[in-house]
Amino acid sequence: MAEQAQPPSTLSVQSYDESAWQRTHRCGVLRIGDVGAQVTLAGWVQSYRDHGNLVFIDLRDHTGITQVVFDASDDKAMHDLADTLRSEDVFAVSGRVAARGPGLENPKLPTGQIEVRAQKLTLLNKCQVSLPFLPDASADAVGEELRMKYRYLDLRRPKMQRNLRVRAAAVRAIRDFYASEGFLEVETPFLTKSTPEGARDFIVPSRLQHGSFYALPQSPQLFKQILMIAGCDAYFQIVKCFRDEDLRANRQPEFTQLDVEIAFPSIDRVLSTTEGAVKAIWKSVLDIDVPTPIERLTYDEVMDRYGSDAPDIRFGLELRNVSDIASASEFNAFKSVVAAGGVVKSLCLPGGSDLTRKQLDELTASVQGAGGKGLGWFRVRGGKLDSPIAKFFGETLQTQLIERLAANEGDLIFAVGDASKSVVNKCLDFLRRHLARTRGLIPEGVFKFCWVVDFPSFEYDAEEKRWVACHHPFTSPRDQDIEKLAGDPGLVKAKAYDLVCNGQELAGGSIRIHRQDVQNRVFELLGFTAEDAERRFGFLLGALRAGAPPHGGIAMGIDRLIMILTGSESIRDVIAFPKTQSAVCPLTDAPSQVDERQLRELGIDLRD
RNA sequence: GGGGGCGUAGCUCAAUUGGUUAGAGUACCGGACUGUCGAUCCGGUGGUUGCGGGUUCGAAUCCCGUCGCCCUCGCCA
């Protein structure tokens, strides 16, 4: 035993071998039943409390925290070394599990009934830098860029560890499920061909063929169709996708999808298989039984009732069309939009009469921010409407409005009218979600799923004066709508479906067109010439002509899935190494400049 | 590309709206302490107020430009 503690400068040459850190337990597992056991633990210093001749260290690993006690009266040299331990130092300790005395337990820790009386301390590595933040809950307040730059610290936090582990568990559940259903896992290339339309591609220069570029896939869409044509029958893959578009709160330039495709499909089979996967994920990750079958709603119905194709059905506040009542009123702002072919819709906020004029003005401003011209509101008082614009509505109309919304005394009815139906829906969808959030109408810890089916196939782009595909140009119209392709494309519904969870699109897919004649008519409608189509998707069209089975599938956003499972606010919290809004990685400093030699090999000259 | 918010000590924030030497909490460093667990007590280090320019006797504060982060619209078949 040394006569005095080694000075810190020599600690780095303390000799130890791997036997020092062979752990008998992890830091979060010891309980009162383990008292008396001889154990070895290893991990990081979470915190230290120095009482002179008695030092307490909270030792942390990915499983939790155990308090270790170093007593000078047990071993003075060991205690003196423990005295030098600081946050995030790495050490191993051997000792005996002891029950804490009465009143000394820590009810905040699962291990709080015990502690480890240290007998041997090995300092494995000193944390030699001053850390910008400590990996505990206080880091929630730290700027995100800093958390990303020091991601190895951020990921040490229990919350981030949990997110990583939930992600791994969900991915494992998905693999197990699809494998057990007989799906074949196939990898598709990352270095592939740029396909025009859609999102902007990330491109990779070719060294062997100067002037040519690969594109990173926006999704494996075309490859999975080719796998079906190749006779694979049922395919899945958990795969990175790349889109070079501006980022958002829920968007990263590279993201992960579960990609699924089956041959000889029915919509029922795609949907029920996906439900099976969802059930398996929620069961294995959260031990929650998701009831199936999941309710199926048509696109038209959800747009009517919720004003959104990704409705949050955890709460009510459903929309009602009141165009007829508004049109019969003397309120010109509403009368005129109905006359112009527009629509007036309402929703009723139970107990909403307590909203102040100021709050209502703020709501109006928000709705205007969403594109609306204004927001009508009526308090329900004594069976009548109380509002600056109530005078334009006769007694009968007031009663009709109250009945239409099933409103009760003290409720508040909102109304939005616009010549554009989509503006009305957009405003009320915003209002509905906003009210639910601010009024606490969203139940905690609840997952509500629904399918949205029968999407329109095509949408008329008024600016470009042409029809565009709502999903993608390979989406099959419903069988009964094929004849409408020539007549009114706006009425054609697609064999396309979205899975929505808590108001977020979780997955989406379609049955593809496998008939050459139908595909040609769709290309024609979208204004592609045969040459266009051939140039853009030639390899797929060639495959489709070679005996393509009917096929269809779905893709699920894995990052969004993990956000939902973990209750995360940001997609960046469920990705180990995310990028900022300007697509920069603060940890690695990517993207960065490359050597002149690399550019020369690629035949690239930089412009300005 | 457009709109908005933010940028002050390692971190989170303040600075009475242009006025003395830019403060607090926390972290960090040193000392004391044998039952703490947000330890406590005593002492201490720590600032290019993002960067550049301007106005002014005087700028964290006002103006112009610029950079970065976040939110949002466009965009994301």
Image: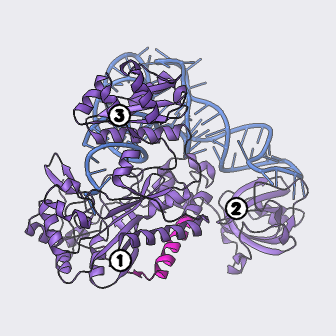
Chain colours: A purple, B blue
- Amino acid found under the numbered disc labelled 3: Gly
- Amino acid found under the numbered disc labelled 2: Pro
Residue at which label 3 appears? A369
The answer to whether marks 1 and 3 mark residues whose Cβ atoms lie closer than 8 Å is no
Q: Nearer the observer, disc 2 or disc 3?
A: 3
Q: Is residue A412 magenta?
A: no
Residue at which label 2 appears? A8
Residue at which label 1 appears? A262
Where disc 1 sits, the SS reads strand
Q: Which of A275 and A492 lies nearest the eye of the viewer?
A: A492
Which segment did they paint magenta?
A: A164-190
Q: Nearer the observer, disc 1 or disc 3?
A: 1
- Callouts 2 and 3 in the same chain: yes
Chain letter of disc 2 in the image: A
Q: Residue furthest bottom?
A: A231
Left or right of A531 on screen, residue A142: right
Q: Which of A164 and A77 lies nearest the eye of the viewer?
A: A164
Left or right of A213 on screen, residue A18: right
Q: Is residue A321 above or below residue A229?
A: above
- Callouts 1 and 3 in the same chain: yes
Counting residues from the N terminus, which is met first, the one under dot 2 or under dot 3? 2
Q: CA distance from mark 2 to mark 1?
A: 64 Å
The residue positioned 55% from the left and 70% from the top of the image is A169
Q: CA distance from mark 1 to mark 3?
A: 43 Å
Q: Residues within 10 Å of mark 1 (few under 14, many from 20)?
A: many
